[in-house]
Image (tube, helix red, strand yellow):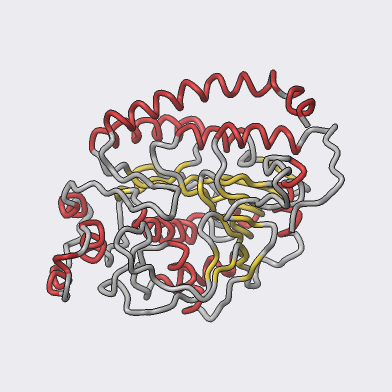
Amino acid sequence: MKKLFRKQEAVILIIMGTLAILIVVNDKNNNSMTSGTQQDPDKNLPLKQTHRPLHMWWKRNSCSLNAMNNNLPGFSDLPDHIKDFLRYRHCKHFQILQDIPNKCVSPEQSKEIFLLLVIKSSPENYERREVIRKTWGQERTYEGVQVHRLFISGVNSNRMSAKKSNQIIQLENQQYQDILQWDFHDTFFNLSLKQVLFFKWKEKNCPGVKFLLNGDDDVFVNTENVVHYLKGFRSDRHLFVGTLIMNVGPIRAKWSKYYVPEQVTTLNSYPPYCGGGGFLMSDFTAKAIYNASLNLMLFPIDDVYIGMCLQKAGLFPSSHMGIRTAGVHAPSENTDTFDPCFYQELLLVHRFAPYEMVLMWQAIHDATLKCGASAPK
């Protein structure tokens, strides 16, 4: 296996030399300038939140604060980010800052696109987007079908950081034409809003796309496997697969990033849903989710909200063993979970650093790779 990776070192060093500079600069900017929301990948850690008054931001989008929520019992004791969510959860219309209305050529011609990769990306995550473009997110024709790519984003909640990240997104879009950006704070509790805004955009600009892969910008995708799998389905039938989560309910512990108080919902259990790191759906299901969202109030946990929309539409999500939003677990202590043989038959794995995406993409496409076993069960 060491010999396999050494063969790719020359290619990887060129890419990673550039990424290393970008990552260092980005880290310095985040440490010195950013006081906004940090999306902590550890679900057991609390959500850090910025508190520039959000009403000043939403005012620009003609969405008024709902002061009625201020009278809810216990409202004054809630964390500020939850107070803001309750005051503005009715807001679903925001100005689009970066648009690519011709991404699918035209609404009529969008039916020629087989798979649209829809990647949720925070505005400052330039290096992640750049690596995805060069690896699994390449726009191309594979097995006779077209694969296209989109990143969806809001704006940084810190004004100084927003100025820089908006500039880099503008430059990226001039070169790649692959980013949709709306004028709302790109925070954890606004991920459901981001999804709703995308579905609305899709129905207007790309209504005929056959299938969607919806995922975070830190997932690794074996795109060829995804295309091969989806070719066995019809886009005009229900399909929604991922890592199925059932029989769970709201976390009421205030320290948790996923804290949802009773003022947000009195439900004790969530409907079945798939982990938000990544899932696949047909065009039929995407339309059903969007239509359900029109009459369903936003919920702060985006994958749960998608599950709520599916439930409202009378549809059910399914599990796929090739989608690992909880990562890959080694069958023994002596097994390396970064072994490319684990990934040959998988569709999607959550939580990859940019350099890991480069390494794995090169490894699974190496003609000399020999594997004696399939992906772990």
Q: Position of residue 12 (x, y in %)?
A: 65, 24
Q: Position of residue 137 (x, y in %)?
A: 61, 41
Q: Is 309 positioned to the left or the right of 224 in the image?
A: left
Tell me the quadrant of the picture where the C terminus can be found.
bottom right
Q: Which residue occupies 70% across, 67% down?
A: 234
Q: Which residue occupies 39% across, 36% down?
A: 124
Residue 250, by quadrant, is: bottom left
Q: Is residue 124 above or below residue 262?
A: above
Q: Position of residue 110 (x, y in %)?
A: 59, 54
Q: Position of residue 303 (x, y in %)?
A: 47, 63
Q: Is residue 296 above or below residue 9?
A: below
Q: Nearer the viewer, residue 76 or 151?
A: 76
Residue lying furthest front: 333
Callout count: 0
Q: Nearer the viewer, residue 167 or 45?
A: 45
Q: Is 23 positioned to the left or the right of 139 in the image?
A: left
Tell me the quadrant of the picture where the N terminus can be found.
top right
Q: Which residue occupies 51% across, 74% down?
A: 310
Q: Is 66 positioned to the left or the right of 34 in the image?
A: left
Q: Is 167 positioned to the left or the right of 368 in the image?
A: left
Residue 239, by quadrant, is: bottom right
Q: Which residue occupies 57% across, 55% down?
A: 326
